[in-house]
Image (cartoon, rainbow, N blue to C red):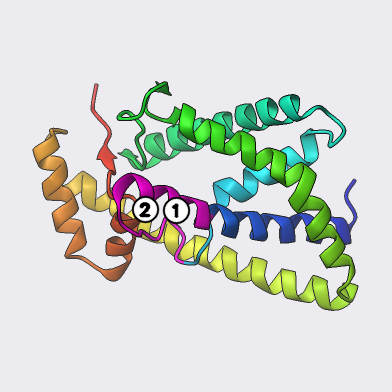
Amino acid sequence: MLEFYEFIILCALFLFYSFIGWIIEIIFTFFTEHKIVNRGFLIGPLVPIWGTGAILITLILNPKDSIFSLILSSAVIGSVLEYIVNYVMEKIFKVRWWDYSQFPFNINGRVCLITSSLFGIAGLLVVKVFNPMFLKLFLMIDKSLFCILVSILIVLVCIDFGVSFNIIQKLKISVDSVYKDYTEEISKKVKKTLMEKSIGFKRLLKAFPNVKLSKKK
């Protein structure tokens, strides 16, 4: 069973990697869409899927494994996580938040070779470079102060998540009340309608410019 301090360290790693993931997402979007977009559904500069993936990699993988094994395992863990998150969010909110259909070697548009490769390389860096560096940094900080600071940040992230989730819930209600079917044209009209509703909606749609409505069966 994890001790409280060990749990706080994991929370700190989650925050760091979520922030790093946010930066990676911005860079990726800049090169693919030629514009800077505040990625992620949180208001703050965090993409939790990257932080979650990094924590899973930290807990599952052995730093002593070969480089090839670490890259491959990280790619698999990251891809499975991304696929599940994409699928669950679509089923809950009836909206496809990101779609890689335009990229080669994709699976149902939920994951693709490019992002899987990024997860693989990122996982290697997490295990071999960033984890040792961050842990060394954490040990330099007073334990009590470190626990307080991380706890405060986690509380702020939870508040951010609650606010953002509330926005997404409203987005679902708005979507359900606007469209009659799921054609591309209706999808565009829905996004236009939501853009006029609030700043929260605008930020979400800017973060996910290619959001698509799920199709009814």
The picture places residue 200, in percent across and down from the top left corner, at 33, 66
Query: In the displayed structure, does residue 125 sit left or right of residue 107?
Result: right
The picture places residue 55, in percent across and down from the top left corner, at 71, 45
Structural crowding at the residue carrying mark 1, measured as other residues with C-alpha within 10 Å and reported as few (<14), some (14–19) or many (≥20): some
Which image quarter holds the C terminus?
top left
The picture places residue 181, in percent across and down from the top left corner, at 13, 34
Q: Which residue is mark 1?
A: 27
Q: Indicate the secondary structure of the residue bearing disc 2.
A: helix
Write the start and end of the magenta stretch as one range.
22-43
Q: Quadrant of residue 102?
A: top left
Task: Say if the magenta span includes residue 41.
Answer: yes
Seen at 22% across and 47% down, the residue is 175
Q: Is residue 84 visible?
A: no
Report the amino acid beneath label 2.
Phe
Seen at 66% across and 66% down, the residue is 154
Q: Between marks 2 and 1, how big is the CA–CA gap?
A: 5 Å
Q: Which residue is mark 2?
A: 30
Q: Nearer the viewer, residue 80 or 168?
A: 80
Label placed on residue 119: none
Q: Is residue 168 visible?
A: yes
